[in-house]
Image (cartoon, grey):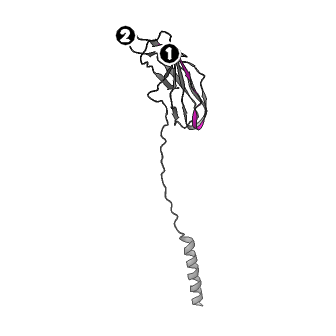
Amino acid sequence: MKKSVLAGVAAAGVSLSAVVFPATASAADTTVTFSITAGSIAITAPGTATLTENDLLNTATGSITGVKVTDDRRGIGGWTATASSSAFSNGTGAGTTTIANSQVTYTPGLATTTGVAVVTPGVLGTLGSARNAQVATAVVGSNTATWSPSLSVALPPDRTSGSYSGVITHSLA
C-alpha cells in the first residue's frame, strides 16, 4: 500500500508541476518606418518651333509639338496651364519689323492624358494677354497631359524680310 500512496503522490506532483510551472510566453516588437516624398507639378515644352510663312494669307503658321504637364502631387487639386507670347521681331535697328503679341493666335487642341484627370482645352484666341491652354479638373492622384498647340501669326502688309523670333511661354497655376 505504501507503493500505491507514493505512486499517487508522485502522479499528483507531476500534474501539479504542470499547473504550477506553465511555459513562458514570448514576444518580439518591430518598429516599422517609411517616408512619403513631396510630389511636384511641372510643365515642359520644346526649346524651339518653326513657323512657315503663307504669302497668300499673310500669316506664319505651325505648331509646338509636345507641351506636357506632369502632376506628381498625388492629390485631388486641379491645375491650369496658360500660354503667353512676346512680340516677334526680325532684329534691331533700321529695317526692323515688330509684330505685336496680339497678332499671335493660339489654338490649344486636345490633350492626351494619363492618370485620372479631366483635361479641357482653352478657347483659341490671340496672345495679347495670357490665356488658358489646358485646365485639369476631377484630378485623383498623379496625371499627365500632353498637347501640341497650333500658332498663327498675322503678318503686317509692310513687313520687312528677315528671320523673326519671339517667345511663347507656357506656365502653371
Q: Earlier in the sequence, mark 2 or mark 1?
A: 2
Location of mark 2 (residue)? 93
SS at mark 1?
helix
The residue at 49%/22% (across/down) is: 52
Residue 107 horizontal/vertical position (percent) = 57, 23
Residue type highlighted by circle 1: Asn
Q: Residue at x 59, y 86 (%)?
A: 5
Q: Which residue is mark 1?
A: 101
Residue 117 is drawn in which quadrant?
top right
Cα–Cα span, label 2 and label 1: 20 Å
Observer-nearest of 26 and 66:
66
Crowding near the residue tagged with mark 1, few <14, some 14–19, many ≥20 C-alpha atoms within 10 Å: many
Q: Is residue 128 visible?
A: no
Asked whether residue 106 is drawn in magenta, I would say yes
| Residue 100: image location, x then y, percent | 49, 13
Residue 156: x percent and y percent?
50, 11
- Of all residues, the one furthest to the front in this rendering is 56
* 142 or 52, nearer to the observer: 52
* Mark 2 burial class by Cα count in 10 Å: few <14, some 14-19, many 20+: few
Residue 116 location, quadrant = top right
x 56%, y 82%: residue: 10
The span picked out in magenta is 99-117
Q: Is residue 152 above or below residue 15?
A: above
Q: Disc 2 residue type? A: Gly
Residue 160 falls left or right of residue 118 = left
Q: Is residue 25 visible?
A: yes
Secondary element at image label 2:
loop
